[in-house]
Amino acid sequence: MDRFAIINNRKRAIIALVHSVFFLGVAGVQLAISHATAFSLHNEKVVGGAILLGIYVIVTTVLLVLLAYSHCAKEKLYFALCAASAGFGLVRILLGDPVLHANVLRVLLLFCAVIIGTGILRTHSQAAVTD
């Protein structure tokens, strides 16, 4: 069996998959209704933009740290996809995205993360059945 460092049991796999599906839904809604403008300190929505920017910086950093600590290829791929998606969200906040290229990539990356997360969950579920 693959040697997982972080998503090392079925419960953690379910939690990771639920997070991925939730953020896929958020990215999908943003894709459908939002056209992001670039972050600016001279904008009337500076507080909300700064909070969102801070959230994306923290989430991207945490996902990159998890990527660094992960062991097997499935786990590394899962965290790489999630970190890349968060990174595109960060870029989208900083630079804006009036034509939604970054958000389309976020949805695609998160969809792939959900597929990999499902595979990780199946791996843990099969291991639980054989034990």
Image (spheres, grey):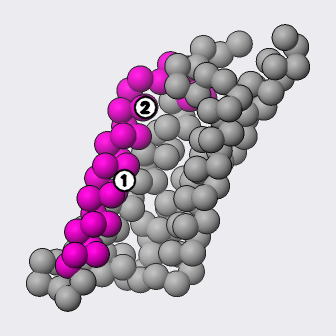
Quadrant assignment, res 54? bottom left
Q: Residues within 10 Å of mark 1 (few under 14, many from 20)?
A: many
- The residue indicated by pointer 2 is 67
Callout 1: SS: helix
| Residue 69 % position (x, y) | 41, 23
Q: Residues within 10 Å of mark 2 (few under 14, many from 20)?
A: many
Quarter holding the C terminus is: top right
Q: Amino acid at mark 2?
A: Leu
| Residue 74 % position (x, y) | 60, 29
Q: Amino acid at mark 1?
A: Gly
Between the C-alphas of marks 1 and 2, the distance is: 13 Å
- The residue indicated by pointer 1 is 87
Residues drawn in magenta = 46-75
- Whether the magenta-drawn stretch holds residue 72 is answered as yes
| Residue 56 % position (x, y) | 34, 57
- Whether the magenta-drawn stretch holds residue 1 is answered as no
